[in-house]
Amino acid sequence: MMSHRGAAVFLAALFTACAPKPVGPPIQSVATLGEVMHDIVIPNAEVVWDSVGTIYTVKGVEEIRPKDNNEWMHVEQSATALTESANLLMMDGRAKDKDKWYRLSIALRDAGAAVHKAAKARNPEAVFETGGQLFEACQGCHFAYRFTPDPSTIRTH
Ligand code: HEC
């Protein structure tokens, strides 16, 4: 008959053999949610929003547009960073839940991809429009998770 020790070793081996393999690659969140916002999301959103616009002055109307291929590439790069940052937001350790948070993150991913497409097409009007979609994606999540539900304490800046 197997000793107790022998049985324990046997069971340990059995459990090891049957333990579920981790699904997917060993990804792990390192930066905090606030750091992802500050270091990836915000600077890249600013590149997109600053790239196209119209300034009205007493002297006339100034259209802001990417001037050359380099500046367009810069918008494309930021759009890629924004698109992929949505995947970072959905990682364990950052996601606040697995339902609404995922949906609002996917809205950011879709907006980032739309900006990227517009920039690749070198279409300033489309960058302006998808930049609005991007802003709505930010706000959608912030109103659900960042601002407190008590209206008297909602931050206005
Ligand atoms: C899926 C949810 C989600 C999306 C999408 C999102 N954010 Fe955030 N954001 C948050 C949360 C939650 C916080 C609060 C984080 C904290 O205090 O730790 C935050 C914080 C911030 C802050 C304040 C940081 C601080 O230190 O006070 C800024 C600015 C910000 N986000 C900008 C953006 C911009 C710009 C976008 C869109 C391009 C965006 N966020 C998209 C969830 C989101």
Image (cartoon, rainbow, N blue to C red):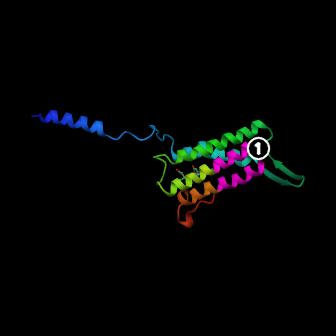
Quadrant position of the C terminus in the picture? bottom right
Q: Residue, x 67% and y 55% (percent of image)?
A: 133
Single out the residue that lies furthest toward the right.
59
Does the residue tagged 1 have its C-beta within 8 Å of any atom of ligand 1?
no
Single out the residue that lies furthest toward the left.
1
Q: Does the magenta stretch include residue 103?
A: no
Q: In this view, does 77 lie to the left or right of 33?
A: right
Q: Is 143 rendered above or below residue 18?
A: below
Q: What residue type is labelled 1?
A: Arg
Looking at the magenta stretch, what is its main secondary structure? Answer: helix
Q: Residue, x 58% and y 43% (percent of image)?
A: 84
Residue at mark 1 = 122
> In which quadrant of the rendered view does residue 122 lie?
top right
Q: Residue 75 placed where, x, y %? A: 71, 42
Q: Is residue 95 left or right of residue 68?
A: left
Q: Residue, x 71% and y 49% (percent of image)?
A: 49
Q: What stretch is highlighted in magenta?
A: 111-135
Q: Residue 152 placed where, x, y %? A: 56, 66
Q: Residue 63 placed where, x, y %? A: 83, 49
Q: Residue, x 57% and y 56% (percent of image)?
A: 141
Q: Is 41 rendered above or below residue 133?
A: above
